[in-house]
Amino acid sequence: MPADRDQPLAPGLYLVATPIGNLEDITLRALRILRSVDRIACEDTRQTQKLLNHFEIKVPTVSYHMHNELTRTDELIEELIGGARIAIVSDAGTPGIADPGGQIATAAIAAGISIFPVPGANAAISGLIASGLPTDSFTFHGFLPAKEGQRKTALEALVRNGSTHIFYEAPHRIEDTLADIETVFGPAQHVVIARELTKLHEEFLRATVAELRTTLSARTIRGEMVLLLAPAPAAAPAQQAQTSIAEAVSALMQTAGLAEMDALKRIARDRGIGKSQAYRELQREQNRRK
């Protein structure tokens, strides 16, 4: 397809991906569009200004972040209706992916405004393709909840279908998150951490969750990271039926080092039954043995 760099930039909303660490990952198209729009809406104008200064781009900027997304969307939509050309950028990566951008895209579609995705760097995909985990089926979850109970609930809800699950995680929470993964999936669960992607100190850690907890407890953890895991598929119902809940709970406690209730939760999830139902069945089996 011939390049359209000599054509005037069409009015509309441009969702422009920016580097996640390495400035060389900016695309030629992104640079052309950022130089040609009327305004650039930024998650943090100070952060984006560093990028613009590096590439000598002198275009007015305006803040567009989670705290003013609602009101700023209305303002920008009015400008777009009037024929403006506006770019949306986040601090790093692709707008709308765990960053502002999705709300204004929805509003622009409702207003009949043209939207142009300008692809580029993305931490989740970059981590996935170098993780060694399955890439044919995956789910991106963004950040896990900060509170322990909610985080465990989110992890317990993951379908055991062999799909790869991708999360963003902050360095001050990674050890707690790994502890919850070990509780839910057991110490042998394979986990990949992709840290400081595309930067000077880029690092991939691939090991069991128990091994990663030991590794990270002995060092200072810095930098945003991508966390990936692919839980083992659940056993087929015919296979599950051969083992009682009490026997399955006992086996998990011995092989995975889980507490009784954590083992029971996992078995209930794998067998597609409620935790209360599994608990009642466990009690009945235990009472029959008395």
Image (cartoon, rainbow, N blue to C red):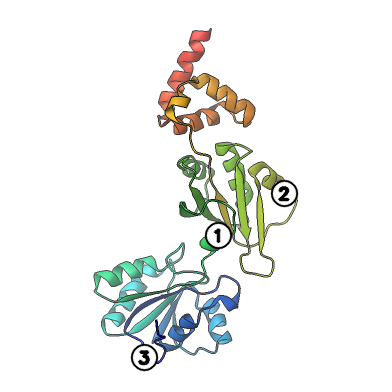
Residue 19 in picture, x, y percent from top left: 55, 73
The residue pinned by badge 3 equals: 7
Instruction: Give the labeled residue for mark 2.
Output: 215
Q: Circle 1 sits on which residue? A: 129
Q: Position of residue 53 (x, y in %)?
A: 56, 86
Which tag is nearer the camera, tag 2 or tag 3? 3
**Is 289 rendered above or below residue 132?**
above
Q: Which is in the foreground here, disc 1 or disc 2?
A: 1
Q: Are marks 1 and 2 in contact (CB under 8 Å)?
A: no
Residue neighbourhood size for the residue with mark 1, other residues' Cα within 10 Å, grouped as few (<14), some (14–19), many (≥20) = few
Seen at 60% across and 31% down, the residue is 258
Q: CB of mark 3 within 8 Å of CB of mark 1?
A: no
Is 113 located above or below residue 225 in the figure?
below
Q: Nearer the viewer, residue 286 or 197?
A: 197
In whole angstroms, how far apart are the C-alphas of marks 1 and 2?
Answer: 23 Å
Looking at the rendered structure, the secondary structure element under dot 3 is: loop
Residue placed farthest to the top in the image? 290
The residue furthest front is: 1
